[in-house]
Image (tube, grey):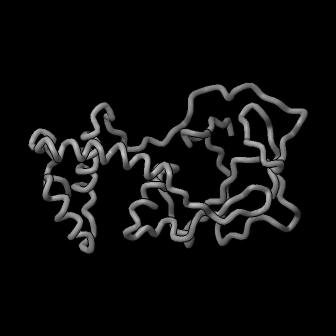
Amino acid sequence: WNVKQNPDEHTQEPKGTSIRAESFQYDASDELNFFATLNNALRENSPPKNEDALMNVFDLIGLGSRHAFNAAQIDPATRQGLKRAVKTGKHIVEAAAFAGKQFAGGWKLPPKGIGNFGHDYLFRSFVAKVGIGALPAEEAIYMTTSTDEKGDDLDGRRKYVLQMPRGALPPVNGFWSFTVYQLPTRSLVPNPL
């Protein structure tokens, strides 16, 4: 499959507001707010039993499914360590390179194991950063591209044609769809269809 630029067609910047799925945001003005948000998520969605050992470590600072996180009760050394962990963690997730399988035309398949993260918290964090989440391959396959057939970045001011050779539609047992996202926010592009 190729994404070809239609050289005779240029459009203006997309108009309208972005359509963005609401992610669970927190007030990043204080790094410790991340842990309050994490604590709320853990309390609303109890971790599986096989993560009890990790939750016991979290308990040491009042974080986890059994406690309500209270930043005011944390000693100064732990406070400083948690703030540093948020900053360092962001860099670690951003640097994570989970390359999928590359195909002709710039299309990529996601890495193996997507949607079945197990205890691979870095992979899970990376997927949460670049998207809202992911289903396992048995449920959905997310092929992506951000370049045209020449390897140039896709540009919302241009029009493209997605070409699929006759008889080469994606193999499916249900349906397939095509969704356009804006980078770097990965929010949906407004679309009158």
Q: Residue 142 vs residue 45: left or right? A: right
Residue closest to the far front: 77
Query: On the image, which quarter does residue 190 sit in?
Result: top right
Q: Residue 164 vs residue 90: left or right? A: right
Q: Quadrant of the C terminus?
A: top right
Q: Quadrant of the N terminus?
A: bottom right
Q: How many marks?
A: 0
Residue 163 is situated, as x and y percent measured from the top left of the image, at 84, 54
Residue closest to the far right: 8
Q: Residue at x 20, y 57 (%)?
A: 64
Q: Residue 54 vs residue 26: left or right? A: left
Residue 175 is situated, as x and y percent measured from the top left of the image, at 66, 63
Residue 26 is situated, as x and y percent measured from the top left of the image, at 32, 38
Query: On the image, which quarter does residue 66 sit in?
Result: bottom left
Residue 47 is situated, as x and y percent measured from the top left of the image, at 27, 65
Q: Considering depth in this image, is 55 or 8 the residue closer to the camera?
A: 55
Q: Residue at x 46, y 69 (%)?
A: 116
Q: Residue at x 68, y 60 (%)?
A: 108
Q: Residue at x 48, y 65 (%)?
A: 115
Query: On the image, which quarter does residue 72 sit in?
Result: top left
